[in-house]
Image: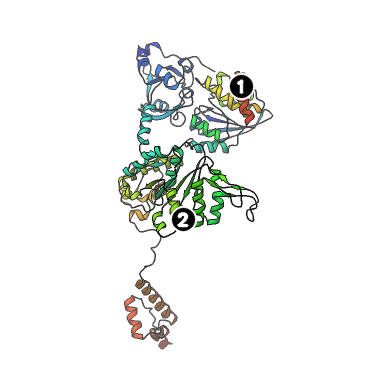
Amino acid sequence: MKKEPIPIPKESWSGAESILESISDGVFTVDGNWRITSFNRAAESITGIRRQDALGRMCSEVFRASMCEADCALRHTVKTGKPIVNKSAFIVNADGRRIPISVSTAILRDNRGRIVGGAETFRDLSLVEELRKELQGRFQVGDLVSRSPAMRRIFDLLPQIAPSDATVLIHGETGTGKELLARAIHNLSPRKNKPFVGINCGALPDTLLESELFGYVKGAFTGAAKDKPGRFALAEGGTVFLDEIGDISPALQVRLLRVLQERTYEPLGGTETRRANVRIIAATHRDLSALIRKGLFREDLFYRLNVVKLDLPPLRKRKEDVPLLVEHFVARFNRRQGKSVAGVTPDVMALLMAHDYPGNVRELENIIERAFVLCAGGQIERKHLPPELTGQPALVPAPAAERMADQMRAAEAQAIRAALERCGGNRLAAARALGLHKSTLFRKIRALGIELPREDGRRSRRKS
Amino acid sequence: MKVAITTWNGRVSPVLDVARQVVLVNIHDGREVGRLEASLPGSDLQAQVAALVALGADVLICGAISRPMASALSLAGLRPIPFTAGTVEDVLAAWQSGNLLNPAFTMPGCCGRMRRFRGVWSGGRHRRQGHEPDEPLPPREAQDAKGKGEKR
């Protein structure tokens, strides 16, 4: 392989070498074959590649930037003659680290003005990126994003809650991120390298839930051909997340209470007691105190669960999070779907801010996901939002009037139209068929605005 | 045996994380018996790994690879030969002759790291297929490679 450097003529350097060596931005130059002809000290430091190794090699194999293949800034400049300033990318250094950089380019010409190559300067943005992440981190824990004071208080508590093994009870409306919070606690805890096992207690019938939680042994019931470990066994050393804990039956509440009190359980049909080395995080959207008053939830279980209680506020009470969440979801869907949606227009943001979000953050996420399906690029506009948000009539016909009086009017009109049709338009015959006096029928026809058929039956009889 | 090489302009693509093209070469008894090209997403890391796994290649030869990408590939059970540079044909010929560790096919600045990568990664798949590299591995790395190979 050709490795000899192709030096730029000394006269074109004109003492610039010492200046290039002194700056903190990486600089390299290439010849017409995209081989490196100079490589300054900062370039060595940022890329981790020695000058002697870089000189003469293809710039893409030295620089290894994310833009090299699809959107090379230097190629663009050489092709169009236009310099590029501060284009963002990342490079993969010798240690496999992704280093965020900003790139600027320029054309190199000789004394006669002929293009002899290009120059690229690049700045290490690692520090800027770290600071940006730190700033972002103040608003984000795991997948939870918020800048509201109520959520901030929860975020501040997490580093204290996570390391302990204390049972946590999360209360919040549907779609507020109860499972995300549970995962965040798990990921901040010393159990983070062990499994996080979640189960929705409201989704399974009682007996099935019991076997799911505690497992069963071979022969416990018909079809139990072999032992099956329960969620407590699967989560050994990790965290069990019991969602919709308010929906479990009193019988299961007793068994769960024993796990919480003694950290032991027996699989279905088993005689051997097993230890549960798990942390339990429970969540519910229901008011457990009210359930206790109604006798539907055991008080002792509630107090076992309620060691640390976290209340997730609904989105309507933290509207200041909507722009941050929109930005978060747009970035996520761009990443997942390989799109480059730039965000939302100001009037879309105004509509999103005005909405009440009965489905909370999940509803907002769904709105953005729906918009991504319809929006190919640019910004998400009003037309990409669901009709219920924009106030436009829905595409599907509105359901029939719900008031009883309106429904009765509609039914009467339908019966009269059908009778008239059956009687060939003869009003008297239709009135008899309906059991009405002819005057009552005429009054109803007028009141209900029923259009009468052209032929009235009598006339057609006379004609015949 | 299927050998996948990520490509760009006839050379090994500089960065696997964003590579958009891959050539899949079918080799039987040391001879090429078929070749096809495929596209890669070149954007999302997980999608890129999924596309590479879907190729069903026995060997993946590629350019620079970031640590997150290396971890994701490792989880997916893929052991690439990273930080490789050169034209696709030269690299393929070098791989077939067991000469891919030659510095001429190594990206600049990656000697130490690359040998470590290759020592471990090629120690599993590459070696078991009887392709002993020309250059012997240093004893410690060779031991690591052997250990990994036995585990898998």
Q: Label 1 lies in what chain? A: B
Residue A223 higher or lower than A39, as above or below: below
Which quadrant holds residue A128? top left
Work out whether residue A396 or residue A221 is closer to the camera in this orientation and state it.
Answer: A221
Q: How many marks?
A: 2
Instruction: Decide if residue A338 is in sight here.
Output: no
CA distance separating discs 1 and 2: 58 Å
Quick one: label 2, few (<14), some, or many (20+) residues within 10 Å? many
Three-letter amino acid code of the residue under disc 1: Ala
Q: Chain of mark 2?
A: A
Between A316 and B61, the one lying in front of the other is A316
Q: Do the dots labelled 1 and 2 sit on one chain?
A: no
Label 1 element class: helix
Which quadrant, please, contains the N terminus of chain B?
top right
Question: Is A61 displayed left or right of B101 in the figure?
Answer: left
Residue where numbered disc 2 is placed: A247
Q: Is residue A416 left or right of residue A248?
A: left
Q: What residue lies at 54% left-to-right and 38% top-to-bottom?
A: B51
Question: Where residue A89 appears, x then y in whole percent?
Answer: 41, 30
Q: Residue at x 43, y 42 (%)?
A: A333
Percent position of residue B7, x then y: 53, 30
Quarter in which the C terminus of chain B is drawn: top right
Left or right: A309 as drawn, with respect to B52? left
Q: Secondary structure at mark 2?
A: helix
What residue did someone put label 1 on? B142
Q: Is residue B15 above or below residue A48?
A: below
Task: Determine which of the numbered discs, if any, sits on residue B38 in the image.
Answer: none
Percent x, y of residue A7: 44, 13
Residue A265 seen in render: yes
* Residue drawn where x is 45% and y is 32% of the image: A70
Q: Depth-wise, is mark 1 or mark 2 nearer the camera?
A: 2
